[in-house]
Amino acid sequence: MIDQRDVLSAAPPRFTSAEAEQLARQTCGLAGPVAHLDSERDQNFRIDDERRGRFLLKISNAAETEDVLGCETEALLHILATDASLPVTRPCPVEGDHYWASVAGHDGETHFVRLFTFLDGRHERPEALDGAALYAFGVTLARLGRALRGFWHPGAGRRLLWDERYASDLRPLLAHLDDGPRRAVATKALDGYQARALPLLGSLRAQVIHNDFSLDNTLLDDTKRVAGIVDFGDLVHTALMCDVSTALASLLAGRNDPLEVADALLAGYGSVTPFEPDEIAVLVDLLAARLVALVAIAAWRVEQFPDNTAYIMASVESAWAGLSWLDEHGFDSITKSFLQAAPLVRASTVSIAPKRQSSTTDLLERRQSAFGSALSPLSYEHPLRLVRAEGVWLFDAEGNAVLDAYNNVPVVGHCHPRVTEAIDTQARAVNTNLRYLHPNAIELAERLCASMPEGLDVCMFVNSGSEANDLAWRIATAATGGSGGIVTEHAYHGITEAIASLSPEEWVGDRRPDHVETILAPDGYAGRYRADEPDWAERYAAHIDDALAALAERDLRPAAVYVDSGFTSDGILDPPPEYLRELVRRTHDAAALFVADEVQAGFGRLGHCLWGFEKLGIVPDLVTLGKPMGNGYPVAAVIARSDLVDKFAQTTEFFSTFGGNPVACAAGLAVLDVIEDEELVRSAAETGHELHAALDLVGARHDSIGEVRGSGLLLGVALVGDAATRSPDPRLAHRVMNGMRERGVLVGTTGPHRNVLKLRPPLAVRSEHVALVARALGEALEEAGPQ
């Protein structure tokens, strides 16, 4: 069924040139003659401002959404930042810093007005392009796809009739074709597409693409090379190959040498981005689907908008000719020719695809057999089978996108191009260990120490947060002579033998190591002391005296107190600075060391500061780093006072084979660069505040949300069975977590009762994602209902 608010079914705007000239003056501050340009569903006007130059004024179809406009704008800005030499139009702000303004049309609808730089060049007929020009056309298309490779925006997730992934949606439109041989050819083409191409599309490379890179949307110079790329209105996330089939459909029009055209286009494109065999295997059917779309959509739209018949029907006859050629020559013959012409990915290229293809059920069985019973279970009732990621998005094997509001390891965003490029570049040069000189480790150590308070001046590299906490424990016991540890009552600090003993979250049954004591976590909502009570935070801190006394009864001196700066496993708590200041004071009075575990809270996650302990106003003796430090590449560190390290050195020599290797440190340096250049600490504070406020609004409608807490982009939503007693409801939390997963948003659960939803998205999350999280939470709560 066709959505009646779709841009293809809504009437185009009907502004006169005089009205467009007035709009340009009011919204863009431009003055000059206006020329009307052809368009299918919007209105375009060229404006010649004598002082500022030439611009394109676009008045969008009333069915166009701000989400789609935002996607187009950000895509263009991304392309210009990624490959500035590509000749794309540049969006220009209107009415201040905004890229569009709204105006009322004659039809009573609201339209959006946008402004772009005007590109010079001319449209050409396909027959004007020789082999060299066709090759260059393919090169430019591939470069555009490469520039968009790391881009994502929710607006690109829409369902379009022009997206060949959804070619099956064209079937109802075939009724608008004359019932005869032509309709039979179109029906046969869709049958072939569904039988051969559709089953493969989910396994092909996919990303945001232009999706209409045709001669109508490119301007050529005197040498017939692309001088301008315009109209990003069909931008969508789909199979990368759809860009190639769309371009080929345009270039074949009116020519009698289709195989030669395809050969040149594929050779040019493949010189930049070689094809995978399966991509060429579906090309004929994708091309057929595009040609069916051209004839079927035109037949449907011309009935709606007969006044625009000439424009709508301009490409129809050439599309029918292309379909006839495909039908006459057959799928196998043309595909064989395409395979001979297309540069393929070299057979020697390393593949990350599994050698054995398995269903999800098969994978679950193999997982259990291969990993054993000790491994923690999968996160959701309906397991996620992920194949790739970009920014804040994860993509499953079916191509569905899910918003990652859970994983804090990709702190600057999944597969950030600067981090992956740094890893790739260094891995191709040399990777060794710290017994050889290399600047990466030295520079990273210097930058990390420079970010710390005075006195924390030594950096020791390891591979994981667990190893970092283990090393901190060894330093603490060597420096103090003590052997007792103190942690919060449901803390998690790692998996080594020593640190598992300091991780009560992992204790099973009656396991409580003799040398470890726990203290109450500062839960001011449902804990022993409430935030509305006087001195509640200091009263929590005072419990360390009970722990010290208990250790003393067993003749144990304390070595260290460990605190996760975000209290993540304790339920994500945000106590006032007085709590940790008092805790640190009492720790030092007992001659023990204070370890700030920044493995989850560090690298700007709490907002305002790079490190969580800064926000809490303390100076620790040791700082442990891990998880997000390499954005997914294993690298971790301990930052310590040199006097403590000197005492440790008197008892042992320390070395880690992989700790501080050049590749890991290249990743760490890139992460620090991105955090600084993209101002992610400030962003975490601002977006975190927006997310907190949005979750509070959901809480105002649901009594089961007892409290939204945390700081920056480490937030917890405490779900309760009774608002008055604040009793935890872990069952509801489990249902809501899975309900949000079904709505495309990933969160976790945490806390002693597992009743707190854990939100810790990559710091690349933005305002547009906040609404998705809040909506998914509200809908999941509604679905869960009263229990």
Image (cartoon, rainbow, N blue to C red):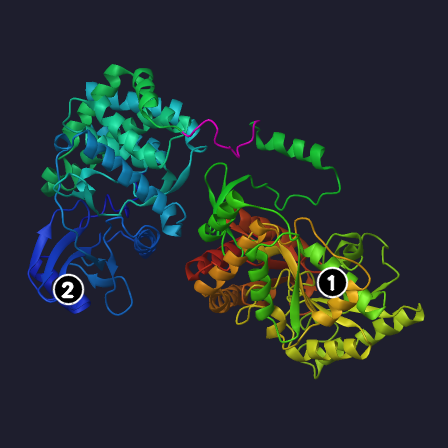
- Tell me what residue is drawn at x 70 percent, y 45 percent: 376
Residue 527 in view (yes/no):
no
- Residue 401 location (% of width, % of height): 46, 45
Q: Secondary structure at mark 1?
A: helix
Find residue 31 and report its image quarter.
bottom left
> In the current view of this chain or complex, which residue is farthest to the bottom?
534
- Residue 604 location (% of width, % of height): 55, 65
Instruction: Please report whichever mark, 2 or 1, sits nearer to the chain's N-terminal start.
Output: 2
- Tell me how far mark 2 sits from mark 1, CA to CA: 65 Å
Cβ–Cβ under 8 Å for marks 2 and 1:
no
Q: Secondary structure at mark 2?
A: helix
Q: Which residue range is magenta in the image?
A: 345-356
Question: Is residue 346 magenta-colored?
Answer: yes
- Residue 32 location (% of width, % of height): 8, 64
What amino acid type is highlighted by mark number 1? Answer: Ala
Q: Is residue 684 left or right of residue 324?
A: right
Q: Is residue 363 left or right of residue 375?
A: left
Residue at image mark 2: 23
> In the current view of this chain or complex, which residue is farthest to the front?
437
Which of 344 and 318 lies nearest the eye of the viewer? 344
Q: How many marks?
A: 2
Question: Is residue 354 magenta-colored?
Answer: yes
Residue at image mark 1: 472
Find residue 619 and report its image quarter.
bottom right
- Tell me what residue is drawn at x 16 percent, y 46 percent: 39
* Other-residue count near label 1 (Cα within 10 Å), few / some / many at <14 / 14–19 / ≥20: many
What amino acid type is highlighted by mark number 2? Answer: Leu
Find residue 366 and report its image quarter.
top right
Which of 555 and 15 lies nearest the eye of the viewer? 555
In the rendered image, which quarter contains the N terminus? Answer: top left
Residue 779 in view (yes/no):
yes
Which of 29 and 624 lies nearest the eye of the viewer? 624
